[in-house]
Amino acid sequence: MSKPIRYLKLSYILMRKGLDEELSAYQLTTSQFEIMGYLYGEAEIEQQQLQSYSGVTPATLTGILDKLEQRDLVQRRLSHVDGRAKTVALTPTGQALCGQLIDLFHEFEAKMLEGFSAAERALFTDWLQRIAKNLGYHESD
């Protein structure tokens, strides 16, 4: 395995592990927090779109949503636009928790990027976007 791939994978593993440790105090996993993050600030999102954003399988997303719904952090309902589709939204409890966790996430991100200048952070972001694009990711507007 090449050094860039090895360090990219190692960074991802350490990032997930560190974030999972931080979120464990809130009985959340990184995957659950990620889903809540997509919903934060949105009225609702179709479940299929949420699955596309997160890149997880429909079954995995259903499991994540089931756990969040049991804790009254999200709610699912039938779409007003397409009765066959479900929409997902944060509950007021979920909104409040997400609001609390934003600071935690920004602190984690600052720790992760400590020692990087603003220019290096911008370049790093550009490189990651280019890698994602090279691997088939198409950013939606």
Image: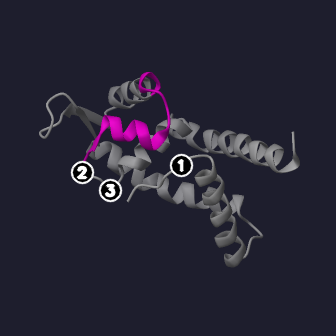
What is the crowding at mark 3: few (fewer than 14 residues within 10 Å), some, or many (at least 20)? Answer: few
Is there CB contact under 8 Å for labels 2 and 3? no
Q: Position of residue 110 (x, y in %)?
A: 65, 64
Q: Position of residue 71 (x, y in %)?
A: 36, 30
The quarter of the picture where residue 131 lies is bottom right
Q: Image height check: is 70 above or below 87?
A: above
Q: Magenta stretch mostly in which secondary structure? A: helix
Mark 3 vs mark 1, CA separation in Å:
24 Å
- Report the number of numbered marks: 3
Secondary structure category for the residue under label 1: loop
Q: Which residues are magenta?
A: 43-60
Secondary structure category for the residue under label 2: loop
| Front-most of residues 96 and 62 | 62
Residue 41 bears which disc, if any? 3
Q: Residue type at mark 3: give it.
A: Gly
The residue to which callout 2 is attached is: 43
Q: Residue type at mark 1: give it.
A: Tyr
Q: Is residue 49 magenta?
A: yes
| Front-most of residues 70 and 37 | 37
Is there CB contact under 8 Å for labels 3 and 1? no
Q: Position of residue 24 (x, y in %)?
A: 57, 37
Residue 137 bears which disc, if any? 1
What is the crowding at mark 1: few (fewer than 14 residues within 10 Å), some, or many (at least 20)? Answer: few
Mark 2 vs mark 1, CA separation in Å:
25 Å
Q: Residue at x 34, y 26 (%)?
A: 70
Q: Position of residue 62 (x, y in %)?
A: 39, 25
What is the crowding at mark 2: few (fewer than 14 residues within 10 Å), some, or many (at least 20)? Answer: few
Q: Residue at x 72, y 40 (%)?
A: 13
Q: Residue type at mark 2: give it.
A: Ala
